[in-house]
Amino acid sequence: MSESRTIAVWQDRVRMRVHAKGSGPALVYLHGPWGLVWDPFLDALARDFTVYAPEHPGTSPGVPDDIYHLDNLWDLVLCYDELLDKLNVDQAAIVGHSFGGMVACEIAATAPRRARHLVLIDPIGFWREAEPVVNWAEVELPHLARRIFRDPDGEAAKRLLGTADDPEARVRITWAMGATGKFIWPIPDKGLKKRIHRVKAPTLVVWGKEDSFVPPVYADEFTRRIAGARLHTVEQAGHAPHLEQPDAVARVVREFAKA
Amino acid sequence: MKISAFHLMPHRELPEDFEKRYPSVWVTPPWHELADPARVGQYYNWTLDELLFAARAGFDGVCTNEHHQNAYGFMPSPNIMGSVLAKATNGSNVAIVQMGATLPTNPPLRVAEEYGMLDCISGGRLIAGLPLGSPMDVNFCYGITPMEHRERYRESFALVLKAWQSREIFAWNGKYHQLANVNLWPRPIQQPHPPVWVPGSGSISTFDFAADHNVCYCFLSYSGARAAKSMMDKYWQVIEKRGLEANPYRAGFLQLVVVGETDQDAERKFARHVEYFYHKCMHWPAPYAAPPGNQDYRSLEATAKNPVRRMEDPKTLRYKDFVEKGYVIAGSPATVRDRLKEEVIDALRVGNLMVLLQIGSMPHELTLENMDRFAKKVLPDLRGQWDDEGWVNHWWPEKLRNRAEVPA
C-alpha cells in the first residue's frame, strides 16, 4: 500500500494530501476530474519510481473548503510548485490524466526544469469549435462510468466511481468534479496554447482509442504542439486508458520515463 | 397582505411533440426551429399588456424575472420590461417588483444603476429583487464557474447595497470586481434603499443569507405549497433561531393559479395550458440544475445523505394531478380562495404572495379572463389577511404600504 501525508502550502491555507510509494527517481502523478484512487497503474509505476500522487486541493477528506483559497490556474500551478519544493522533489517525471494532464502540462510550461519527462494521458487544455470537449458536468452520475470507460462494469470503473447508490461516493465524485471544474469551466482552454511552447521535457501522449469525452484530434494537437512528442494509442480503452489497461499503459510509461 | 401578478413571458406555441423532439427547454432549444422574432414581439407586448391589465385590476404589484436561452421565460433583461411598467403605472399604487436582475449575470453596478432608474421613474415604487440566478442561466448560459456562483453573488450583493447607500465616493477592491470610484447616478428615491427580495429555491444557505441581511425571502416554486411546506418551515426556524420577529412579510411565495366560474369551468378552460407548462416548459436534463461545485460541500453532503424526495416526473401527471397535489391552485373563486388561504398563506406564513396567472400556452384573452376573475372574486377576500396581527410590511415601498383597496 501507499503511504500518505498532508503538506500545507499557500500560506498554510491549502492542505494537500500526497500518497507515496516505491523507490527510485521521482514520478508525480496528477489525477483527473473524479479524484484520486490508488490503483494498479500506480503500483506498477512504483516498481521503478518513487511515485508521489497528490490529491487536487479540496478533494482530500476533511478539507473541502480549501479549494476556495485558489482563484485561478496560476494559483494552482504555484501551489504545485510549492508542494514539490516541500517534497524535496526538484525534478520528476510528471504524469497527468485528463484535467491532471492539463495541470501537468502547465507545470512543465511554467517551470520547464521541473519536468524530466512528461506523460499526458487523454489530457484537456485546448478547444476546437468543430470538435468540442464534452463537459462532463452535463452527464448524470449514473451515466459517467459508461462515458469514461470502455467497460462501465469493469473493476476500474468500480474502483474510481464506487457504486451509484453510495452517497459517500456521490459526494466524493461530485465535489472532485466541482473542485477541478473551477479551473476549466465552461471551456477547458485557459491559455495553454500560449504557453505550451515552453515545455522542454521529452513528452509522451497516451490516448484511449475510444475516448468519448475528448476527441482524438486533441491527441494530435498535443503531439504537434510539443516538440518531439510522440503519441501512443491504447486499444480497448476510453478516457482513462491507464485505469482500464493498467499493465499495458504502465509498461509504456515506465519504458519512456526510464529512458 | 400584498398580492402581485407574476409573469414568465413564455413561448406560447411550442410544437405538440416539443418534449419528445428536443432535449431541453432551457440552454439548448434551437431558436430558428422554434421561434419567429415578429411573433415573439407579440408575446412581449401581450406580456406587458397582461401585467398592465393586472395593475389596473387591483393587484398590488407586477413582477418580471430574468432567464436566458429559455423558451418558458425569455426576459433576459427584466428591467427593460420593468421600465415600461413603471412608466405606464405612474400615478397608481402598484409596486414594480423586479424579481429580478440576476446578480452574477450582470455587472453589479449596472443593476444598482438600473434599479435606481426604475425607482426614480416609478416615483419610489420599486421592489428590488436580487436573485442568485439558476445554474442554467448563470453557469450554463453565462459561463460563470459553478463554484464561484455564490461567492460572486455575495460580493455583488454587498456592492449594490453599498453603492445605493454610501454618502461618499468609495473604492471597491473585491475578488470579482475592482472599481476605483463608485459614485452611483442615479440614487433611488426610497431610503436607505428600495426593499430587497431574495428569491430562492429552498437552499439552506439562502435562508441564512436572507436572515443575515433582513430581506424578504421568496420561494419561487412551480410545485406548489404542499411541496414547499417543509422548506418554508426550515426558513421560519432560521428566523426564530436568530431572534427575528416572525413577520409574515419576510416571506414571499409564487403560486400558479387558474380561476373559472366553477371547478369544471376551470378545468375546461385551463387544463391544457397547465399540462403544456409542466410537460413542455419544465423539460430539461437533471444535470443542468446541479452542476458540480454549485452546491457547497455541506449542502452537497446533506442532499446526498438525506435526499429530498425526488420530485416526481411531471410528464407522468395530468391536470387533475397538478390540481390535487397543489402544483396549481385551480377551480371556482371560492375553491381558489380557500386553498390559497389554507395551503399557501397560512401554512407557509406568507405575506407577499405572487400569483402566476398566465401559464404556458394560455392565450392573451384567456389570461385577461383569469386575471380579471382573480382580481374581482378572489383578491378582495384575501387582501385583509394578516391585518388583524398588525405586522408592518417593511419589504414593501413605504408609500404603498397602506394603499386603498380601490385601485388608483
Image (cartoon, rainbow, N blue to C red):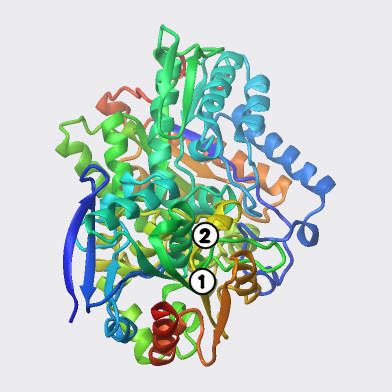
User: Pointer 1 indicates a residue of which chain?
Assistant: A
Q: Are marks 2 and 1 on the same chain?
A: yes
Circle 1 residue: A203
Q: Amino acid at mark 2?
A: Val
> How far across and how far down the image is residue B210, in percent?
32, 36
> In which quadrant is the N terminus of chain B drawn?
top left
Secondary structure at numbered mark 1: strand
Depicted A159 relative to depicted A79: above or below: below
For the point 43% across and 17% down, which residue is it? B171
Secondary structure at numbered mark 2: loop
- In the rendered structure, are the residues bearing label 2 and label 1 in contact, judged by CB atoms less than 8 Å apart? yes
Residue A23 in view here: yes
Of B337 and B186, the residue lying toward us = B186
User: Pointer 2 indicates a residue of which chain?
Assistant: A
Circle 2 residue: A199
Of B54 and A10, the residue lying toward us = A10
Position of A20 with respect to B189 (left or right) is left
> How far across and how far down the image is residue B391, in percent?
28, 25
Of all residues, the one furthest to the right in this rendering is B38
> How far across and how far down the image is residue B356, in percent?
54, 46
Depicted A121 relative to depicted B67: above or below: below
Can you tell which quarter of the image residue A104 is in? bottom left
Of B99 and B95, the residue lying toward us = B99
